[in-house]
Image: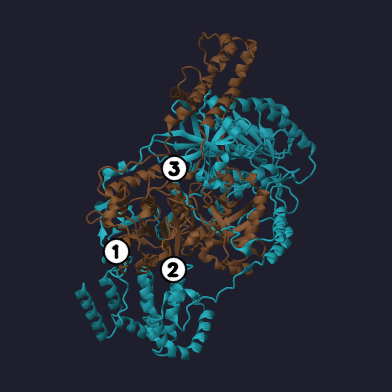
Chain colours: A cyan, B brown
């Protein structure tokens, strides 16, 4: 069990991996109330003998290492670190008996839905054949199911592979409410293609006999591992989301039960933990709570006590305050129902109208035979006529009515109706898109269509994936494609739990493999891609000059530009200002699109960019303008460029008011204030104060939450250290302002 | 290297509006309403000359009333889905003049502003005036208007607005195809003005209504007035509308600016990328949640949220917060950056994995609303032509493209199917399905619930046939336009009443309620036959349902499942069998009889019936 060729995992290691996956599934799903599964772990072939049946010579080398209990991290830690190969032989039938005994004793008096022994072994060691009958009788009378993983006992009868088959398969590991695993530490194997020993063949035939008698199942290690290679939660308990009649007209009522069939599985939510408490000497519970406070939109941001709050609803600009009594009358009273509005051709319901977060399946009520017959007849009729029902669905009293489609699904053993939500009139946006043939140059030529044809052929996925049996099957089948985010978070959580000091593990290769087109496809298709690229003339739009984002390179380059501009710009400074005021007509701007705010006529560029009609570039323009202002201030020799910078600042302010974006400017001014406290830019800041370029107040822009007083005091407070005369100026202005109000 | 530099250009494309995750990094429900930062603005410019008030053909509303009804619908629609957008209404062809430039016969009814209750009320008043007599008194009619003035007024309204405006559009409602007949100079003036407006980015859409006599001829005047934005050009002008529904469909197609959620690269293979825009064309409009008000002033208050450490009482900054999950009874702690890293699967965009037959994407593979993909030429040249070729060939071969979809940097990858969609125009040359790909989200293995069901019985042919009759008599042409969301309607009807101080909210019809009267009338006979064929006499769905639940609980509580309830029955099975009425009996009765008559049979009702029929030699 523990020997393996170089570079391969031994059977023991593989078994340990499988056990690890089985147990961690349970641990991951412990949040669910329904999950109270318990586990025990028994090893056989150990040095020690530690079990209740052990008595000289009897039940030797078998150890119960974890008694039956809910699995926790310590269980996982044990599996990861404490299972090591041993040298002793142990009778695997003895081990089975120890397991049965343990289950019997530990479960008596408790209620378990399901008892199971999952038995891992390569059956390499000698065993005594005399107890077979006792074992089968015992398993039967105790209601214990037996699953054997390891030996390749004829892979005959576990081929239940219809569409749902894979899931069913998986349930073998997850369905039990109490499981019990045992593993062996024996030598000699067939795992890597070696021949079976006579001992193994004998063991297999005995085990096979037992399995037949107790209706157990067996899996090879390889197939077990491939079903276990992804983390999976225990299946969620099947609960109804609706019980009631499907109604057609006032008379026909067919009783149904409904269940969720498909819904996006989301990762567990992350909970917050206070790092402050964690780092302190006596970390407590480290809980983080959220405190909310409510403030008026006035200058002092007056806080409003919670009891003085009222609710209101918006009706466009009108706000309707709400009394508690009104609340109920607002809601639509809808009785629980599933009512057919009519039927329509299947093709009338477009795929892209399907809404909602999943699929609900309706089945006839159990134990209501007439309903089941009526239901089946309806499903069959819909199926044969290729029609679907449009229904109103209210899943419980007074929940919002949903409109939906019910369409038939017929499987080997059952017929069902699937429900998916459909949009209301308000939910559909009917935009018009230009015809792709509107522009002649966009119509592909015949040879180009042929190229695309070749690509489609060579990237065909329906026979692209080689399964375990070497057969080509459909790649990326949703039912077999696991959510990488879920898998990755399980992987990381488990890894971090067992190795708290390690960095995050690398993405598991089983995930990486299906996140990109297969190597085969990329290799065979490479020439196609190149041909298409050439034929269609695919090219990136010439990238515009790199935006000034403050990197050393760009600043340096701009400095050169600026130096070149300098002589002209000082001459043009006046005229360009005039330009912006006099010659600034919208139509002249729309003629050319300005990609970038230069240093020559920044104000004009800025305005042009903002007023560009084809796309909204306000943010981009502001970003550039801001860096231009910084540049002008910092590059100025003396106060040479300050007037220009000031013009820019003012125009930024203007536009922010005009376009109701005061925060952009206010944020920037705050920034400026913070940064210009040094001697270098301070002179410019004084100009700002002097020029009374205040924050944008609520008076100037309704979007601003800065009061007039706060806007003005912002400049004042900044200048605690300024000369007195400046202070006076500011205060005077403030008085004037107050007078004006 | 080429791909790397290109990817940085896409960064801006991932709009914040596609907020898939909240601040905690939790995925929030997939379908949430998306609101845009930019305000759209729309002016409805309505012809008020005499012909607009003449009832035409079989309409019971005048063209003017059709227009006002559309305007009302636009206002309501804005309130429901984007209440920050600005809407204005301007009349022309009125005797009364009311505009800042004192143009004659142009009257601004509603300035450009967000819609509110009063504005709706104003339109309701206009609608109530059925014969237009009040209108004649209050506004009058005059044909001496100049289209130039009307357009100029609109243009001024846009430029004097104090709010930051994104998109500007004028909808012109008229049924007169040649307002300046014979007056060449007025015609020229209007055409020049229209061109000016076009130059500064104001779109003019014609919402033309069929005149009482003849056909609206766009070539006479309006073809030089209207502007078709390049990205909405379908190559033809739609027909003039006659009915409200027709006009409303056209209005609704234009009352919101088309905005993409994001522009992203579609990587077909190594070194081969094209640009696409992603749109959301179908998403739930939620019932709005309340806002918090100061009860004294009725002002909206803003909410400030702080994180507090319970142990120390100190306020926590983002850097002071770590994240954990419970696992195996212990907390497993991660840094914020690590939480982000766990979800990071690389750069955003679509990556082609390959092609599959369309039938592989089953209808029930549904986890969230689909998106719509349209080529974007702004970053990569040639995108439109290649997408166009892909569309043509995938349609031809009935295949879909399977892609990996990462909407934004570090957001969860999904597998999607790009389902090709051909452009479809309706009989009035209005586009009903745009050309492009529907982006259908595929579920992951974990999203499928494991369900096990009891076997359902096979129905008999006659039952199936009856069910077909029912289906046939209740077949209709489904279209989402037909159903308004009753919960939303109720909410806004009540709000409207409160906002306007009305006592009783306006009635609305809940179109999602089944019209049982009509259903019974159309299919009643078939339904009765079906019930007779399928349900035993005295069967009551209500008690049967309760019984099912009850029985289920008793058996779950550990009692042995009752298989066959022994009951003395004195049914004459032979008679039932001969009359072909066995299907009316309960399965229970049939089973009891089978047992008593020693007929070996199990399972479905149909099997039992067949077995009993055979027993009596009836067939």
Which residue is labeled 3 in the image? B483
**Which is nearer the eye, A302 or A97?**
A302
| Chain to which mark 3 belongs | B
Of badges 1 and 3, the one in the foreground is: 1
| Chain to which mark 2 belongs | B
Residue A722, quarter of the rendered image:
bottom left
Left/right of residue A289 with respect to residue A206 in the rendered view: left
Helix, strand or loop at label 1? It is loop
Residue B474, compared with residue A310, is above or below; it is above
Mark 1 or mark 3, earlier in chain: 1
Label placed on residue B184: 2
Cα separation, mark 3 vs mark 2, equals 47 Å
Observer able to see residue A729: yes
Observer able to see residue A513: no
Cα separation, mark 1 vs mark 3, equals 39 Å
Residue A131, compared with residue B229, is above or below; it is above
Q: Are marks 2 and 1 on the same chain?
A: yes
| Residue sitting at x 71%, y 55% | A453
Q: Position of residue A143 (x, y in %)?
A: 59, 28
Of badges 3 and 2, the one in the foreground is: 2
The quarter in which the C terminus of chain B is drawn is top right
| Chain to which mark 1 belongs | B
Which residue is labeled 1 in the image? B98
């Amino acid at each position: 069990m523990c020997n393996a060729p170089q570079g391969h995992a031994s059977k023991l290691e593989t078994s340990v991996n499988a056990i690890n996956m089985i147990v961690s599934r349970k641990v991951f799903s412990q949040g669910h109330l329904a999950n109270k599964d318990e586990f025990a772990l028994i090893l056989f072939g150990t040095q020690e003998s530690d079990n209740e049946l052990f008595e000289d010579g009897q039940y030797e080398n078998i150890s119960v290492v974890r008694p039956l209990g809910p699995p926790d991290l310590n269980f996982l830690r044990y599996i990861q670190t404490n299972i090591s190969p041993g040298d002793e032989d142990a009778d695997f039938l003895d081990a089975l008996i120890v397991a049965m005994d343990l289950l019997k004793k530990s479960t008596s008096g408790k209620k378990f839905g399901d008892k199971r022994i999952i038995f891992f072994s390569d059956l390499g060691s000698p065993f005594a054949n005399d107890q077979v009958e006792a074992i089968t009788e015992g398993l039967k009378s105790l209601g214990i199911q037996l699953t054997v993983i390891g030996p390749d006992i004829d892979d005959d009868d576990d081929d239940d592979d219809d569409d749902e088959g894979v899931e069913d398969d998986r349930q073998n590991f997850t369905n039990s409410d109490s499981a019990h695993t045992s593993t062996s530490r024996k030598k000699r194997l067939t795992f890597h293609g070696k021949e079976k020993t006579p001992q193994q063949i004998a063991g297999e035939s005995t085990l096979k006999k037992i399995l037949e008698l107790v209706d157990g199942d067996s899996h090879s290690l390889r197939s077990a591992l491939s079903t276990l290679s992804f983390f999976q939660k225990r299946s969620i308990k099947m609960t109804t989301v609706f019980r009631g009649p499907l109604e057609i007209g006032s008379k026909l009522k067919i009783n149904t039960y409904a269940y969720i069939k498909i819904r996006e599985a989301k990762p567990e939510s992350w909970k917050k933990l206070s790092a402050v408490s964690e780092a302190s000497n006596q970390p407590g519970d480290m809980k983080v709570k959220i405190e909310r406070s409510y403030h008026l939109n006035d200058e002092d941001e007056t806080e409003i006590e919670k009891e003085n709050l009222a609710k209101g609803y918006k009706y466009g600009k009108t706000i309707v305050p709400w009394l508690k009594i009104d609340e109920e009358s607002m809601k639509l009273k809808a009785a629980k129902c599933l009512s057919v509005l009519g039927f329509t051709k299947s093709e009338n319901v477009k795929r892209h109208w399907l809404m909602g977060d999943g699929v609900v399946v309706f089945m006839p009520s159990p134990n209501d035979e007439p309903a089941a017959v009526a239901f089946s007849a309806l499903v069959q009729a819909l199926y044969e006529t290729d029609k679907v029902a449009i229904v109103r669905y209210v899943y419980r009293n007074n929940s919002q009515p949903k409109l939906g489609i019910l369409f038939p699904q017929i499987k080997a053993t059952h017929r069902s109706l699937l429900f998916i939500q459909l949009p209301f009139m308000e939910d559909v946006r009917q935009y018009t898109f230009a015809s792709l043939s509107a522009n002649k140059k966009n119509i592909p030529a015949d040879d180009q269509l042929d190229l695309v044809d070749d690509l489609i052929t060579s990237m065909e996925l329906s026979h692209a994936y080689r399964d375990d049996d070497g057969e080509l099957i459909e790649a990326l089948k949703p039912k077999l494609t696991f959510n990488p985010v879920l898998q990755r978070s399980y992987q990381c959580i488990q890894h971090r739990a067992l190795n708290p000091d390690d960095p995050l593990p690398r993405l598991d290769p089983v995930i990486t493999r299906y996140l990109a087109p297969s190597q085969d496809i990329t290799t065979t298709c490479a020439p196609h891609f190149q041909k298409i690229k050439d034929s269609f003339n695919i090219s990136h739009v010439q990238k515009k000059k790199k935006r000034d984002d403050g990197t050393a390179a760009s600043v340096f380059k701009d400095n050169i530009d600026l130096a070149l501009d300098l002589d002209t710009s000082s001459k043009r400074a006046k005229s360009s200002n005039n330009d912006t005021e006099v010659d600034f007509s919208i139509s002249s701007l729309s003629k050319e699109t300005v990609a970038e705010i230069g240093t020559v006529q920044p104000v004009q560029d800025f305005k042009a960019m903002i007023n560009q009609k084809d796309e909204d570039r306000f943010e981009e323009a502001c970003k550039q303008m801001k860096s231009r202002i910084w540049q002008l201030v910092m590059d100025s020799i003396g106060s040479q460029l300050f007037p220009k910078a000031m013009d820019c600042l003012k125009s930024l302010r203007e536009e922010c008011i005009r376009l109701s974006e005061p925060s952009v400017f206010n944020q920037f001014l705050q920034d400026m204030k913070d940064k210009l406290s040094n001697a270098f830019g301070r002179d410019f800041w004084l100009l700002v104060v002097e020029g009374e370029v205040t924050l944008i107040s609520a008076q100037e822009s309704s979007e601003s939450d800065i009061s007039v007083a706060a806007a003005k005091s912002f400049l004042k407070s900044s200048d605690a250290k300024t000369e007195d005369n400046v202070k006076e100026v500011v205060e005077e202005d403030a008085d004037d302002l107050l007078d004006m109000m | 290297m080429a791909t790397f530099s290109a990817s940085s250009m896409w960064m801006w494309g991932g709009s914040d509006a596609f907020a898939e995750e909240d601040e905690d990094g939790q995925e929030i429900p997939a379908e949430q309403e998306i609101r845009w930062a930019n305000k759209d603005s729309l002016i409805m410019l309505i012809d008020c000359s005499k012909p607009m008030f003449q009832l035409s053909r079989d309409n019971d509303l005048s063209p003017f009333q059709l227009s006002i009804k559309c305007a009302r619908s636009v206002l309501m629609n804005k309130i429901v889905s984007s209440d920050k957008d600005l809407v204005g209404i301007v009349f022309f062809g009125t005797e009364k003049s009311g505009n800042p430039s004192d143009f004659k016969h142009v009257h601004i009814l509603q300035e450009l502003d967000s819609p509110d209750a009063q504005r709706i009320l104003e339109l309701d008043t206009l609608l109530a005036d059925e014969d237009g007599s009040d209108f004649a008194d209050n506004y009058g009619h005059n044909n001496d208007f100049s289209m130039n003035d009307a357009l100029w007024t609109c243009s001024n309204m846009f430029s004097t607005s104090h709010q930051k405006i994104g998109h500007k559009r004028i909808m012109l409602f008229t049924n007169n195809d040649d307002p300046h007949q014979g007056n060449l100079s007025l015609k020229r003036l209007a055409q020049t003005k229209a061109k000016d407006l076009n130059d500064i980015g104001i779109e003019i859409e014609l919402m033309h209504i069929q005149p009482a006599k003849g056909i609206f001829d766009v070539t006479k005047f309006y073809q030089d007035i209207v502007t078709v934005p390049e990205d909405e050009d379908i190559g033809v002008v739609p027909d003039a509308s006659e009915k409200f529904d027709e006009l409303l469909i056209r209005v609704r197609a234009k009352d919101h600016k088309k905005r993409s959620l994001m522009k992203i690269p579609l990587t077909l293979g190594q070194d081969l990328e094209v640009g696409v825009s992603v749109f959301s064309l179908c998403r739930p409009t939620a019932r709005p949640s309340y806002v918090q008000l100061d009860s004294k002033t009725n002002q909206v208050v803003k909410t400030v949220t702080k994180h507090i450490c319970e142990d120390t009482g100190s306020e926590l900054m983002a850097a002071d917060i770590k994240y954990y999950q419970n696992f195996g009874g212990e907390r497993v702690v991660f840094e914020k950056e690590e939480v982000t890293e766990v979800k990071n699967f690389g750069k955003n965009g679509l990556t082609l994995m390959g092609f599959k037959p369309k039938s592989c994407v089953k209808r029930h593979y549904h986890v969230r609303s689909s998106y719509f993909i349209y080529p974007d030429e702004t970053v990569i040249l040639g995108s439109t032509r290649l997408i166009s070729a892909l569309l043509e060939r995938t349609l031809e071969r009935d295949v879909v493209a399977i892609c990996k979809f990462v909407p934004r940097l570090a957001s969860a990858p999904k597998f999607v199917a790009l389902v090709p969609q051909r452009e479809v125009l309706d009989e009035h040359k209005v586009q009903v399905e745009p050309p492009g790909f529907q982006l259908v989200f595929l579920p992951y293995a974990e999203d499928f619930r494991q369900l096990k069901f009891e076997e359902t019985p096979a129905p008999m042919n006659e039952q199936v046939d009856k069910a077909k009759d029912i289906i046939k008599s209740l077949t209709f042409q489904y279209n989402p336009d037909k159903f308004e969301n009753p919960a939303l309607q109720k909410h806004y009807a009540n709000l409207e009443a409160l906002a306007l101080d009305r006592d009783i909210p306006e009635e609305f019809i809940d179109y999602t309620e089944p019209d049982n009267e009509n259903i019974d009338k159309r299919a009643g006979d078939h339904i009765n036959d079906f019930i007779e064929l399928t349900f035993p006499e005295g069967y009551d769905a209500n008690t049967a349902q309760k019984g099912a639940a009850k029985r289920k609980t008793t058996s779950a509580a550990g009692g042995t499942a009752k298989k066959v309830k022994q009951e003395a029955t004195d049914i004459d099975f032979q008679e039932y069998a001969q009359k072909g009425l066995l299907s009316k009996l309960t399965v229970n009765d049939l089973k009891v009889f089978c047992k008593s008559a020693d007929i070996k049979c199990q399972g479905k009702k149909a099997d039992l019936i067949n077995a009993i029929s055979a027993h009596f030699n009836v067939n």
